[in-house]
Image (tube, grey):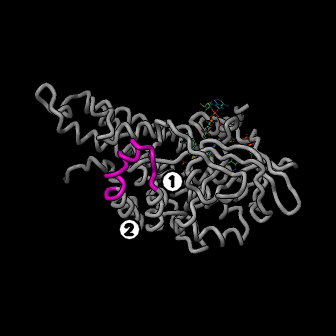
Amino acid sequence: QPALDPLDFLALDALLDDEERAIRDTVRQFVREQILPEVGDWFERGILPREVIQELAKLGLLGMHLHGYGLPGASAVAYGLTCLELEAGDSGIRSAASVQGSLAMFAIWRWGSEEQKERWLPAMHAGEVIGCFGLTEPDAGSDPGTMRTHAKRDGGDWVINGAKMWITNGTIADIAIVWARTEDGEIRGFVVEKGTPGFSAPEIHKKISLRASVTSELVLQDVRVPAESMLPGASTLRGPLSCLNEARFGIVFGAVGAARACYEEALAYAKERIVFDKPISAYQLTQQKLAEMVLEINRASLVALHIGRMKDSGTLRPEHVSLGKMGNVRGALEVCRSARTILGGNGITLEYPVIRHMNNLESVLTYEGTHEVHTLVVGGAITGTPAFR
Ligand code: TGC
Ligand code: FAD
C-alpha cells in the first residue's frame, strides 16, 4: 500500500478531471511564486498593489466562469478551485477576483444591456477596468432592503444620493455598481464611473482583518449619470442578491484554501518543533488537533466539490450555497485557530501565514451574508418559517 498523502487524505484529487487539475495547478503555482513571498508585507502595510489584479487578468481569471463577450466560460468547479488556490494565498486576493468577476462583472453580465456588456465585460476581463459592488450601507448590511441610497429621474439622467460602506476595491475601482432605491420603490443598479462629479471613494483604514485588500466607503452627492448607465434587467433585491450567490459560491471553496494553508504550516511546524525532547507532532494532543484539521478540510472540500458539481449541472439553489458558506467558513476558522496554537509564539507573527488567514476569516465570516444570516436562510428552508423578522 502506498503511504497516505497527509495533504490529500481522502485522495480527492481523483475526483477532478484533467482540465480542472491543470487550472488548479496553474493558480497554485502563481500563488506560490507571486503572492506568498509578498503578501505578509502587503498585509502589514495594509495595501493591495493594483498590479496583482493585472496579474490575475493575465491568467484569464477575472470573470472566468462567465461566457460570451470574449469570456472564458470555465466550469463552476474550475472557478471554485481557482478561488480555493487564491485564498490559500490570502482571502484578500480571492476577494479581489471575486468582487471583479462574481459581483461587478456578473451584475453587468446578468442584468446589463447589450451595450453595457460589450463596453465593460471585455475590458474588465482584461483587468483594464476594475469594478466594485456597492450594496451595503452604514445602516443597512444584513437587511439591504432598508437601503437609503436613492436615485431620482431628472430628464434623461438619474441623480443618485447616498453612501455605501465596506466596499471592496472601492478606492481603486474605475466603475462602481451602485444599488439604489428609485422613487417608485424599485431597487436598481447603476454603473457609476470614477471621476463623476459628486462621487468619491475614500479608503477605510485601521482594519485588522483583510489588510491586503482595499476597503472603502462610496459617497454619492447629487451624482448625475445618464439613463444608459442603469442596468435594465434588475428592479428588485433579486438583482443584487443574485450576484451574491455567485460570490458566496467562491467563498465555499475559498475558505478551504485558507484552512489548507494553515494546516500545512501547522503540520510542518509540528514535525520540526522539539519540546520536552520530542517533536510536538509526537504528542497526542497535537495529533488530535492535526487530525481534526484534516477531517474538517476533507469534509469542507467534499461539500465544496459537490456544490460545484450541482452548479455545473444547474441544480444548485441559493440555500445550498448558504449551507456551504456557513459550514466551510466556520470550519476554516476553527482550523486556523487551532493551527495558530500549534505554532506557539510564532503563531502570532506575520512571519508565518496562520494569524493572517485567521484574521482574514473574521471578515469572510461576516461579509457576503453573516454566519447568522446564512443560518436563518437554511433554517427557513428546512422549517418553512422565515425568521429574519
Ligand atoms: P426577500 O424578501 O427574501 O427577497 C427579496 C427578493 O430577492 C430574492 N432573493 C434572492 N434572489 C437571488 N438569490 C438569493 N440568494 C435571493 N434571496 C432572496 C427574492 O426572491 C425576492 O425577489 P423578488 O423579485 O420576488 O422581489 O429579502 P429580505 O429583504 O427578506 O432579505 C433576505 C436576506 C436577509 C437573505 C438577504 O437580504 C441577505 O442575503 N442579506 C445579507 C446581505 C449580504 O449578503 N450582503 C453582502 C454584500 S456584498 C459583500 O459582502 C461583498 S464582500 C466581497 C468580497 O470582498 O469578497
Ligand atoms: P449587521 O447587519 O449590522 O449585523 C450585525 C450583527 O447582527 C451580525 O452578527 C448579524 O449576523 C446579526 N444579525 C443581523 N440580523 C439578524 C437577525 N435577523 N437575527 C440574528 N442576528 C442578526 N458589502 C458590499 O456591498 N460590497 C462589498 O464589496 C463589501 N466588502 C466587504 C469587505 C469587508 C472587509 C467587510 C468586513 C464587509 C464588506 N461588505 C461589503 C459588507 C458586508 O457584506 C456586511 O458587513 C455584512 O453584510 C453585514 O452587515 P453589517 O456589517 O451592517 O452587520
Q: Local crowd at mark 2 within 10 Å, few (<14), some, or many (≥20)?
A: few
Q: Which image quarter: residue 119?
A: bottom right
- Residue type at the position of mark 1: Ala
Is 274 in front, or is 231? 231
Residue that numbered label 2 is attached to:
18
SS for callout 1: helix
Q: Quadrant of the C terminus?
A: top right
Residue 259: say if magenta: no
Disc 1 residue crowd, few under 14, some 14–19, many 20+, Cα 10 Å: many
Residue range corresponding to the magenta coloring = 32-49
Magenta region, main secondary structure: helix
- Work out whether mark 1 precedes mark 2 in sequence or the reverse, and give the earlier one: 2
Magenta span contains residue 46: yes
Extreme residue toward the left, this view: 277
The residue lying toward the viewer, choosing from 123 and 7, is 123
Instruction: Tell whether label 2 touches label 1 (CB within 8 Å).
Output: no
Q: Is residue 261 left or right of residue 47?
A: left
- Is residue 316 among what the camera can see? no
Rounded to the nearest angstrom, the CA distance separating label 1 from label 2 is 27 Å
Q: Nearer the viewer, mark 1 or mark 2?
A: 1
The amino acid sitting under disc 2 is Asp
Q: Which mark is residue 96?
A: 1
